[in-house]
Image: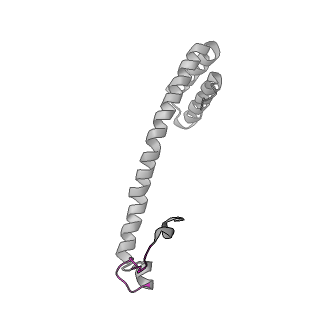
Amino acid sequence: MKIKSNPSLTILTIVFGLLFFNLFLENKIILYISIFLSGLGVFSTKISRIVEKIWFKLSFILSQIIPNVLLSLIFFLILTPIAFLSKLFNSQTYFHKTNNTKTTFIDQNKSFDKKSFERAW
């Protein structure tokens, strides 16, 4: 799918994002970068397209990295400790409380014919 390109809107978004971060960080370099980018967006559409292309490449690279990092952090920092605590404080799982068997395997003594496999679902 082709992404509709609007370089001036991309530059405007980057500038507002930098100015938003500048409110909290109060860094003059961020302010100067936002002024420089807004000037580029106003005066040169060719450079705006280059900045937009770089911005889209950066967002694609981050979209490949960030979800994996977040899911790994959630797994190792939240789910793994919960599983360890569950094992530590619960000696039996719900299945073992309801059934007195040691396995979840249920033996089926049934003969299968050709008709059994016709409509599996």
Q: x%, y% of residue 107?
A: 39, 80
Q: Is residue 37 magenta?
A: no
Quadrant assignment, res 100: bottom left
Predominant secondary structure in magenta?
A: loop
Near-viewer residue (121 or 45) = 121
With 37 as the anchor, is 77 left or right in this view?
left
Quadrant assignment, res 48: top right
Q: Is residue 52 visible?
A: yes
Quadrant assignment, res 39: top right
Instruction: Please give the name of the residue rendered at 48% of the width and 30% of the height, measured from the top-left corner.
Output: 58
Residue range (magenta):
99-112
Q: x%, y% of residue 37?
A: 57, 21
Image quarter (top left, top right, bottom left or bottom right) of the N terminus: top right
Residue 107's place in the image compared with 28, above or below, is: below
Near-viewer residue (47 or 93) = 93
Q: x%, y% of residue 97?
A: 43, 84
Q: Is residue 103 magenta?
A: yes
Instruction: Please give the name of the residue rendered at 46% of the width and 34% of the height, measured from the top-left corner.
Output: 61
Display colour scheme? one colour
Q: x%, y% of residue 74?
A: 44, 55
With 72 as the anchor, is 5 left or right in this view?
right
